[in-house]
Image (tube, helix red, strand yellow):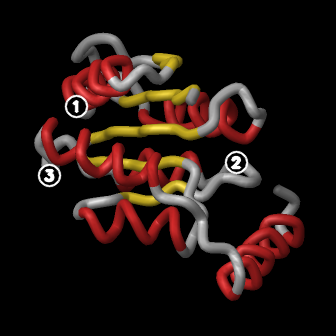
Amino acid sequence: MKISLGSDHGGVDLKNAVLQVLKDMGHEAIDRGAYDHQRVDYPDYGKAVAEDVAGGRADFGVLVCTTGIGISISANKVRGIRAAVVSNEDGAEFSRRHNNANIICFGQKYQTAYEAAKFTRIFLETPYDGGRHQVRLDKISAIEQENGR
């Protein structure tokens, strides 16, 4: 699987830890940065990863900022993206199973490298259930189209 990753300066350490775990699992990774702790703006990285996923250059994405919130909001502005901030195993599973999320987001302030790696593994291994959930995703897509995205 090909995974695009990105973070701002507040998430670079956790992003790098997840990046290494994904490589160890045999996934191909696209590292969109940040690469150090110098201040940068999270929307730039949220957009880059979201465009990789929406454009088919990556199967899934992983985004990290201090809380996971700002970078997820940025990613969700890209049509077709369903970025979910995840803080536990259930969130990792059901963001995929029910919402067909395609980007998992973390807050470096709240997740350890171990947790983020475990949640990412669950996220990537969980299939989308479809069925009754597709009606809801179709409604989300309709909202995107109504608003020009």
Is residue 136 placed above or below 43 in the rendered structure? below
In the visual, does 80 lie left or right of 81? Answer: right
SS for callout 3: loop
Q: Quadrant of residue 63?
A: top left
Q: Where is residue 25 in the image (x, y as percent from the top left)?
A: 36, 25
Mark 1 or 2, closer to the camera: 1
Q: Point out the image quarter for the C terminus.
A: bottom right
Q: Where is residue 22 in the image (x, y as percent from the top left)?
A: 36, 26
The label on residue 14 is 1
| Residue at 39% over, 65% down | 93
Please name the amino acid that badge 3 sits on.
Answer: Tyr
Callout 3 touching callout 2 (CB < 8 Å): no
In the visual, does 21 lie left or right of 100? Answer: left
Callout 3 touching callout 1 (CB < 8 Å): no
Is residue 21 placed above or below 50 in the rendered structure? above
Is residue 49 placed above or below 69 in the rendered structure? above
| Residue at 31% over, 40% down | 65
- Closer to us: 27 or 77: 27
SS for callout 1: helix
Please name the amino acid that badge 1 sits on.
Answer: Leu
Please name the amino acid that badge 2 sits on.
Answer: Val
Mark closer to the chain start, 3 or 2? 2
SS for callout 2: loop
Mark closer to the chain start, 1 or 2? 1
- Closer to us: 133 or 44: 133
| Residue at 46% over, 17% down | 31
**Disc 3 and disc 1: Cα gap in Å?**
10 Å
Q: Point out the image quarter for the N terminus.
A: top right
The label on residue 110 is 3
| Residue at 76% over, 52% down | 79
The label on residue 78 is 2
Q: Position of residue 23 (x, y in %)?
A: 37, 18
